[in-house]
Image (cartoon, rainbow, N blue to C red):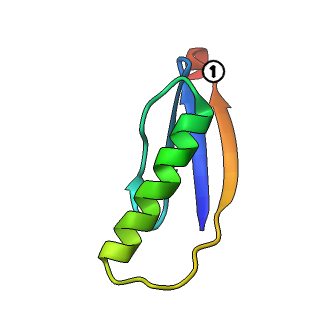
Amino acid sequence: MEVRFFQINGVWDAECEEVGLAGYGNEDLNIVRRNVFDAIKFTLEAEGVNIPIEFTEKIIEIDPREL
């Protein structure tokens, strides 16, 4: 499962195809990573998905001047 972390104006969020926007906007990427992975696991478990989940990460920084 690919999780894309992106930063806009110093705040990190994340998204993935399986659950959409899974962001927990924070300036600390490590806090966002921990919260996002926990939320994705919880969401999939709640939906009855009981297989091991392997994450891949893509980290993107967006320059607000390019928006």
State whether residue 44 is above or below residue 25: below
Q: Quadrant of the N terminus?
A: bottom right
Quarter where residue 66 is shown: top right
At x 59% / y 49%, what residue is drawn? 4
Residue 63 x %, y %: 63, 21
State whether residue 35 is above or below residue 9: below
Q: Nearer the viewer, residue 46 or 6?
A: 46
Report the residue that reaches farthest toward the left. Answer: 46
Question: In the visual, does 37 lie left or right of 63?
Answer: left
Q: Secondary structure at mark 1?
A: loop
Quarter where residue 62 is shown: top right
Crowding at label 1, few (<14), some or many (≥20) Cα neighbours within 10 Å?
few
Where is mark 1, residue-wise?
Answer: 63
At x 58% / y 27%, what residue is drawn? 28
Residue 27 x %, y %: 54, 23
At x 58% / y 55%, what residue is drawn? 3
State whether residue 12 is above or below residue 21: above
Instruction: Specify the amino acid type for callout 1.
Output: Asp
